[in-house]
Image (cartoon, rainbow, N blue to C red):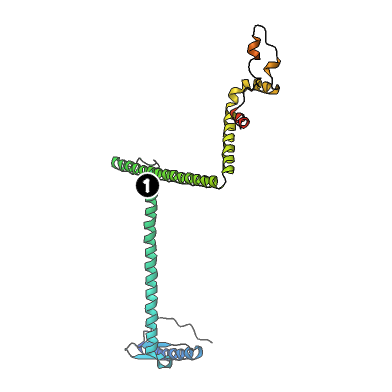
Amino acid sequence: MGRGKVQLKRIENKINRQVTFSKRRSGLLKKANEISVLCDAEVALIIFSTKGKLYEYATDSCMDKILERYERYSYAEKVLISAESDTQGNWCHEYRKLKAKVETIQKCQKHLMGEDLESLNLKELQQLEQQLENSLKHIRSRKSQRMLESINELQRKEKSLQEENKVLQKENPCSFLQLVEKQKVQKQQVQWDQTQPQTSSSSSSFMMREALPTTNISNYPAAAGERIEDVAAGQPQHVRIGLPPWMLSHING
């Protein structure tokens, strides 16, 4: 028949309590020695009796060494726990600060967009108006600066192109003149195309005249009532009617 389960509570009988303490103390010291030997562990065991008598066990009798190691570990663990706690507290505080900043910025942005103005008093509205005016001044100043920079850049490019034209003119005058003449003809062609819709009524008559061969006026008799001397006077004349300027420049050239 096995032993019954011992109820863990204080033994009221003083003699029985002393006997139990002696037996279990010996068993505990024995177990400490066994775990130290079997598992190669550093074990330190300290027991004080009710009368204050000390009983201890330490692996290799190095109680001071084990206790010093325990103190270092305990202190490091406390510091780590404290640092983690402080870090967590700092993160929470930083989060609250950043959240408040974001809300303030969003609120200011809405005010600049003309929204949620009902909560502002007269002084705050005046400050907002002044802020917008200052912003507009900075924007216009920056815009003017950019425009001046663009103008200076275009002037610089124009000057560079003029210098390149001068160099080309010196190196090959004929090619340069041909290029200028070509550009002039193209410009006259564009002007002619632009004015052509306005002269559509006269263009048909121009084409008819161009279709006719060049006529010598002296080959035809004078009409009735005209003087033959006026017709016959001078050299034969060829008629050129309605030619555009760009065609005249080619013919004269």
Viewer-nearest residue: 58 or 189? 189
**What percent of the width, then of the height, locates residue 99?**
39, 55
Q: Residue at x 37, y 78 (%)?
A: 75
Work out whether residue 211 can be spotted: yes
**What percent of the width, then of the height, locates residue 220?**
70, 14
Viewer-nearest residue: 65 or 201? 201
Query: Label 1 crowding class (10 Å Cα cut-off): few <14, some 14-19, many 20+?
Result: some
> Left or right of 229: which side holds 150?
left
Viewer-nearest residue: 172 or 206? 172
Work out whether residue 119 can be spotted: no
Q: Residue at x 50, y 88 (%)?
A: 39
Amino acid type at mark 1: Cys
- Check the picture and name the quadrant holding the N terminus: bottom right
**What percent of the width, then of the height, locates residue 197?**
60, 25
| Residue with the most extreme left position | 123
Residue 230 lies, with reference to residue 252, above or below; the image says above
Quadrant housing residue 249:
top right
What residue is pinned by disc 1? 108
**What percent of the width, then of the height, locates residue 210?**
68, 23
> Left or right of 117: which side holds 155?
right
| Residue with the most extreme bottom position | 60
Viewer-nearest residue: 200 or 188? 188
